[in-house]
Amino acid sequence: MSDPNDPLSWVERAEEDYAMARFALRRKIPFTYSACFHAQQCAEKYLKALLVSGGHAFSKVHDLLVLSDECAQAGILVAVSEDLLSSLSYYAVRVRYPGEDPTPDEAREAIDTARAVRRFARQWLGLT
């Protein structure tokens, strides 16, 4: 059973989301909304892992800007632009329902942003 107070539990879940995002985009007919959703989830869980690693509470939100601000308040300055985090946050809920179909290019950008958050967080956590 995973422990929500263990940053590695968050990392494990984030890694699964990262793998799912990449898999969804590599299909012959890409699952773009799934790629974007899982990319957002990956970044969200890595930001929460950073906060948990320092014993900090976090808001129960999907907004990556809020979580990045909470990281900054905890002394962790996430090296990913606010514009990219904001764009990725969009995919937390809106793409899960019909009518919001991201393009493959948008899905690649979402995965690239998740990869940047992932790289930063793994380095911060000493997992590189």
Image: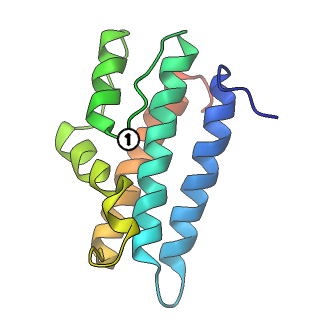
* Disc 1 residue type (three-letter): His
Q: Does 44 appear above or below 40?
A: above
Name the residue beneath numbered marker 1. 62
Q: Quadrant of the C terminus?
A: top right
- Name the residue at 27% across, 78% down: 99
- Name the residue at 51% across, 63% down: 21
Image quadrant assignment for residue 111 = bottom left
Q: Does 32 appear above or below 47?
A: below
Q: In the rendered picture of this protein, how many numbered marks are placed on residues?
A: 1
Q: Does 110 appear above or below 56?
A: below
Image quadrant assignment for residue 109 = bottom left
- Specify the color scheme: rainbow
Q: Quadrant of the N terminus?
A: top right
- Say whether residue 101 is left or right of residue 32: left
Front residue of this view, candidates 4 and 53: 4
Residue 81, x across and y down, in percent = 22, 38
Front residue of this view, candidates 126 and 42: 42
Residue sticking out furthest to the bottom? 28
Residue 37, x across and y down, in percent = 43, 60
- Say whether residue 111 is left or right of residue 81: right
Image quadrant assignment for residue 60 = top left
Q: Which secondary structure lies at badge 1?
A: loop
Mark 1: few/some/many CA within 10 Å (<14, 14-19, 20+): some
- Name the residue at 27% across, 22% down: 69
